[in-house]
Amino acid sequence: MCLGIPGKVVEVYQQEGLKMGKVDFGGGVIREACLEYVPDLEPGDYTIIHVGFALSKIDEDEAQKTLALLAELEMLGEELPELSEDEAGA
């Protein structure tokens, strides 16, 4: 499964002719991403990042809701027991 993660653009710059930026995913996690597909992104905007590329601009409320759901999923995963290979169908 592939998943796009919301983040906040904190810096925008050009690198080798491409619009690039630093994106804050919360908890001190900041990564570089290509912003070329969403050229109107500016610092302070929220975006969905997938494999290092900004895919779309989203509003802050939507970003926060998605991040909260991802946190819940992580907590749920910690509470569920691991499946053995036989149970998982491997």
Image (tube, helix red, strand yellow):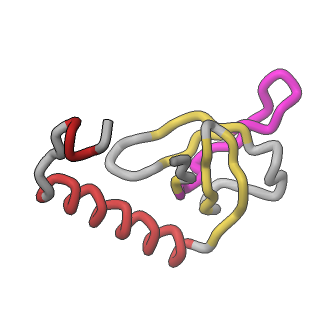
Question: In this rendering, is residue 62 above or below 52?
Answer: below
In the picture as drawn, the residue positioned furthest to the top comes out as 16
55 sits left or right of 27 in the view:
right
Q: Where's the C terminus, which quadrant? A: top left
Question: In this rendering, is residue 59 above or below 10?
Answer: below
Q: Does the magenta-highlighted stretch encompass residue 68?
A: no
Q: Residue at x 51, y 78 (%)?
A: 61
Magenta stretch, residue numbers: 6-20
Instruction: Out of 42 and 34, give the one closest to the viewer.
Output: 34
Residue 23: x, y in percent?
56, 45
Q: Main secondary structure of the magenta part?
A: strand
Q: Residue at x 61, y 45 (%)?
A: 50
In the picture as drawn, the residue positioned furthest to the right comes out as 17
Residue 81: x, y in percent?
11, 51
Q: Does the magenta-highlighted stretch encompass residue 9?
A: yes
Instruction: Out of 86 and 76, give the one closest to the viewer.
Output: 86
Q: Count every numbered label the image shows and give the total.
A: 0
Q: Residue at x 53, y 75 (%)?
A: 62
72 sits left or right of 15 in the view:
left
- The picture quadrant where one finds residue 22 is top right
Residue 49: x, y in percent?
61, 49
Q: Residue at x 15, y 45 (%)?
A: 82
